Image (spheres, rainbow, N blue to C red):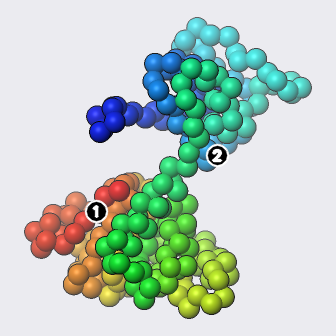
Amino acid sequence: PVRHIIHGFIGGSVVFSQTQAILLCKRIDGMVDHILVDAEKKIGITFGSDENTLKHFGLEPLPRKDNARVQVEMGNLSAACEPHIKKSHFQEYKPNDLTVESVWHFLSNSYATLGGKRIAIIGCGNIGFKLALKLVESGSHVELARRDLWRGMHMADAINIVKPESTIAIAHYNPNPTQASLFCDAIVGCTDGTPVITWKMIQSMKPDGIVIDVGKGCIFKDAVKQAVEHEIPIIRC
């Protein structure tokens, strides 16, 4: 959706190949003031052009700059788009890191200090892991909950290895989301579009606790309704 913000208008587009990203940048170059392109490599290496997209627009395959026999897309959108943006201002950015910063600053401002706080992170992928490390380094005890036990345990171990030796706070893996939420100061939902935070989990945190959805729809609808009725703060980034 195109949103009207204080400085003008902002909109976004999801692409599934470098070809789509390049064609889009060429189309809007000069029509907008700024083009921000995701710097995180989320698209795998593909061999051959995005034939469906090229055929739809009646275009020839993009010229190759390497010696490969076939068109190879490495999946790096910002590197692919930057040479094709001539009029608008190009800027690569990392949306996941913006979300992490947003949640961290909100919690820091809400509690004044994060030292000694207990935070449950439900769903530990890219965002959840980075947020957990940042919170542990700030002195918060973090309970990590995710379905994949092997990856969850390794993520908690990695945080405890990387954090400064003088940092007493730790990350702990808990396979049970309800147990992870017990007596927490905040519950942060970081799943990828799957509701996981229940009313039971919200009830199990501290009376003045906060529930945060990183923006992916991590809270069950009935839990949202119950929380609103009981005046429990729910924040969506």
Q: Position of residue 147 (x, y in %)?
A: 49, 70
Q: Quadrant of the C terminus?
A: bottom left
Q: Residue at x 23, y 81 (%)?
A: 208
Question: Looking at the picture, which amino acid does disc 2 mark?
Answer: Lys
Residue 107 falls left or right of residue 199: right
Residue 172 in view here:
no
Q: Residue at x 63, y 37 (%)?
A: 78
Residue on which the image places disc 2: 41
Is 33 in front, or is 28? Answer: 33
Q: Position of residue 21 (x, y in %)?
A: 58, 29
The relative height of residue 235 versus residue 57 in the rendered view (above or below) is: below
Secondary structure beneath label 1: strand
Residue on which the image places disc 1: 235
Circle 2 residues within 10 Å: few <14, some 14–19, many ≥20: some
The relative height of residue 76 versus residue 97 in the rendered view (above or below) is: above
Circle 1 residues within 10 Å: few <14, some 14–19, many ≥20: some
Q: Could you give the CA–CA distance between mark 1 and mark 2, rounded to whole angstroms?
A: 28 Å
Question: Looking at the picture, which amino acid does disc 1 mark?
Answer: Ile
Is 189 in front, or is 118? Answer: 118
Q: Are marks 1 and 2 in contact (CB under 8 Å)?
A: no
Determine the residue located farthest toward the left in the rendered image: 229
Q: Position of residue 122 (x, y in %)?
A: 42, 71
Residue 207 falls left or right of residue 107: left
Residue 10 falls left or right of residue 223: right
Secondary structure beneath label 2: loop
Q: Position of residue 39 (x, y in %)?
A: 61, 44
Q: Quadrant of the N terminus?
A: top left
Tell me, for residue 223, which label it has, or none: none
